[in-house]
Amino acid sequence: MTRIVTVGAAQLGPIARTESRAGVVNRLLALLHQAKSNGCDLVVFPELALTTFFPRWYFEDQADIDAWFEPRMPGPETEPLFDAARRLGIGFYLGYAELAEEEGRTRHFNTSILVDKAGVIVGKYRKVHLPGHAEHEPWRRFQHLEKRYFETGNLGFPVTRAFGGIFGMCICNDRRWPETYRVMGLQGVEMVLLGYNTPVHNPPAPEHDALGNFHNSLVMQSGAYQNGTWVVGVAKAGCEEGVDQIGNTIIVAPSGEIVAACSTLGDELALARCDLDLTRSFKTTVFDFAKHREPQHYGLIVARKGAIPPP
Ligand code: CDV
């Protein structure tokens, strides 16, 4: 029996700074309904999908920062998404800014959840590779203050059994790191879901600007192939508050081939019928980790952040 999961990659166009959560949720609901009428089992929304990409601004007042975060999931504005998932029988991945009370303090994470067809949260991930900077850098045309507003995720890269397969999640910058896919690959992941907000312009390295879409596809296609997994990467695209963000939302097969893509920079759904059993042909041959991977011969175990091997 084949294991087909029909996936909708639900790209969003820009979200204005003044746009309410309720307004954004209505856009998400429209995409969810469109996905359902196209036979989808699962819809993937972008990173920080409920608001504009707020780390582009420097805020001094903690209350101004916390206003972008969700203290509860679902909360009053997001409950309609969970209700619709339950009613329609469709799952979703959602990225949002999470305010958590843990270890006796308030914590801030860049988070994603996986919700099943019963509207139940079955997986949670907190972004590990936070890009950008922690201090205000006025020379930049726009800020990227993820290192100021979020803590590093503390859940690792777990996988979840759902939708008849093994699912993993990551968020935006995580997709550029081979460890992200490999840690999930070693747990047998069959589909990696991820959302992103990627400005076209990279202030510290403007010479990379023309390569944004190329690098986006490159990392997801190689992550998919090298781990024999599907990868679904979904953008918040277009010109948001004066900052151009790439689109290039794609669904990648375990072969590394792109099987569906968005063609605009607005709200758009890309669809694919994904056979989870296609992963077998890679996981049991060229990337049979148990048979061919040789970690004991790699000669280096780097456990410390930034550790550099001796010359
Ligand atoms: N939101 C992100 O993580 N964006 C980064 C940018 C800053 C390079 C990305 O990797 O796309």
Image (cartoon, rainbow, N blue to C red):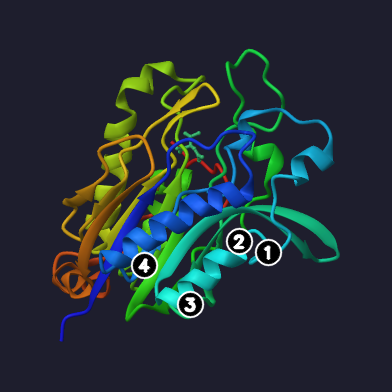
Left-right relation of 183 to 49: left
The residue carrying mark 1 is: 75
Disc 1 and disc 3: Cα gap in Å?
16 Å
Q: Are marks 2 and 3 in contact (CB under 8 Å)?
A: no
Mark 1: give few (<14), some (14-19) or many (20+) Cα within 10 Å. few
Nearest to the observer: residue 85 or residue 249? 85
Q: Circle 1 sits in a helix, a strand or a loop, which is it?
A: loop
Q: Quadrant of residue 282?
A: bottom left
Precedes in sequence: disc 2 or disc 3:
2
Q: Residue at x 39, y 70 (%)?
A: 167
**Whole-Å distance between the Cαs marked 2 and 3?**
13 Å
For residue 86, which numbered disc appears in the image?
3
The answer to whether the residues at label 1 and label 2 have Cβ atoms under 8 Å apart is yes
Looking at the rendered structure, the kind of residue marked 2 is Thr
Question: Which residue is located at x 71 percent, y 24 percent?
Answer: 136
Ligand 1 within 8 A of label 4's CB? Answer: no
- Labelled disc at residue 78: 2
Which residue is pictured at 30% across the width and 26% down the height? 211
Residue type at tag 4: Leu
What residue would you read off at disc 4? 42
Q: Position of residue 23 (x, y in %)?
A: 57, 47
Quadrant assignment for the N terminus: bottom left
Under mark 1, the amino acid is Gly
Instruction: Give the image location of residue 228, x and y in percent.
Output: 23, 64
Q: Position of residue 203 (x, y in %)?
A: 51, 19
Which mark is nearer the camera, 4 or 3? 3
Q: Residue furthest bottom?
A: 1
Task: First in sequence, mark 1 or 3: give its number.
Answer: 1
